[in-house]
Image (tube, rainbow, N blue to C red):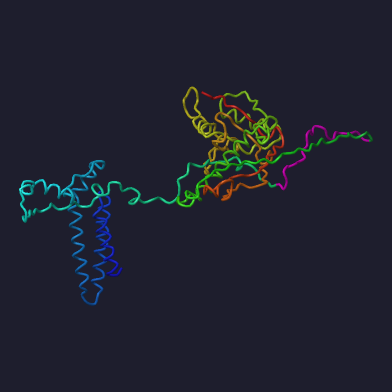
Amino acid sequence: MELKDLEVKLAELKTSLETTLTQKAKDEITLQLKTVTDELKALKDAAPKADPKVAELETTIKELKAAADANQPVIDAFVKNPDKKIEKQRKSFAEGLTEGIKENEDKLRNMKKGQSVSFELKAVEDMTFATSFSTADVSVSTLRPGIIELPKRKLHIRQLLSGGSMGNSTYTYVKEVTGDEGPETAAEGALKNQFDLSLQEVDSPSQYIAGFLSISRKMLDDVQGMTTFLQSRLPELLLREEDDQLLNGDGTSPNISGITDAGNFTAASGSATIDIEQLVQAISQLEGYDREANGILLNPADYWRLALTKGQTSGDYTMPAGIVVVGEDGVMRIGGVPVFRSTACTLDKFIVGDWVMGANLITREAPRVEFFFEDSTNVRYNKVTVRVEERIAFPVYGDNYFIYGDFGNES
């Protein structure tokens, strides 16, 4: 730094010192004064000849250090009781004038023509937050950039599904309905067995998930980070509704037919009452349909309850070794099947499924956030319409790709 830079810095520290009422701020100023002192010493040592400005700045530094020490009682009083206005040590001009007039009231009353009365006013009050700027708030604050959002859901259902795209309003697929008949053994020269394959064409209509909000142009432009906040928060709200539709939609337009809609799942049929045993039986049930169990979905409360499974007699934690494993990645696996947790799943319910082959999330229009400046009366009211939407179809390819069950732990 050059001498002129140090001079500017000392002026800034002087201003800061005159306004500070906290120990932390004073300590920071003292630390910066030490830094300036070191910088000044380095410049002094490196200078080929003495510069009178160096001596001047050294004097300023000494004055500021003395002022910092002198301000300590005021800081201590403020720290002890920050809500109480600090007692004035000096009078304001108006207060001093009033007091002076009162003290010289007799002289002024008996004053004759041509005479004058003089009196000395007390020193005016120092300018501090407590006395001169008690409403200081925004002007002395530091605003953190951006807007702090509410938490995002850690796992959305789309993360468990295979994706795809479509080009029209309806996603149509053909599936085999029954497959019990087939080739049989045949004697030499005998008529071979004839069989057929039963196929069905199924339509899965695309549906919109959408919403909008209206915001003033002023708020959108003036609130720091508002646009970024909307572009982050609105898709999260959209995906939460998507989660609910993919799991619980009843299929009545405009709703999607979700996994727990009738015809898209098979109810768990195991007789176990212990949670882990119920899940093992559901895996077995799914594999009985020649499906591949590749994911178990639980509510986080149910997930962590599994980790606390205890023996009824011993009271020891009893997750069966080899059946229940928590890998280095932190994922719990039951019989090798990963267990996923999401608040999208209803408490005390579970879904054991073939998430890869059992359903697809088909996208007609990907999630997007759009800003419209000329919607309805926006121009007249200086507002902006913000819309978030997507258009998807959700084919579930059969009723035995997902086993849906109930732990029965409702309190």
* Vertical comparison of 392 with 56: above or below: above
For residue 11, which quarter of the picture? bottom left
* Vertical comparison of 54 with 101: above or below: below
Residue 22 x %, y %? 26, 48
Residue 90 x %, y %? 16, 49
Residues 231 and 125: in front is 125
Count of marks, rendered view: 0
Residues 387 and 62: in front is 387
Q: Is residue 201 magenta?
A: no
* Vertical comparison of 41 with 194: above or below: below
Horizontal side of 244 relative to 225 (left or right) equals right
Q: Residue at x 48, y 41 (%)?
A: 150
Residue 7 x %, y %? 26, 66
The image quadrant where one finds the N terminus is bottom left
**Main secondary structure of the magenta stretch:** loop
Q: Residue furthest right?
A: 189
* Vertical comparison of 155 with 283: above or below: below
> Magenta residues, as a range?
166-188
Q: Residue at x 46, y 25 (%)?
A: 315
Residues 385 and 225: in front is 385
Q: Is residue 185 magenta?
A: yes
Q: Residue furthest front?
A: 113
Residue 316 x %, y %? 47, 28
Q: Residue at x 82, y 35 (%)?
A: 198
Residues 202 and 273: in front is 202
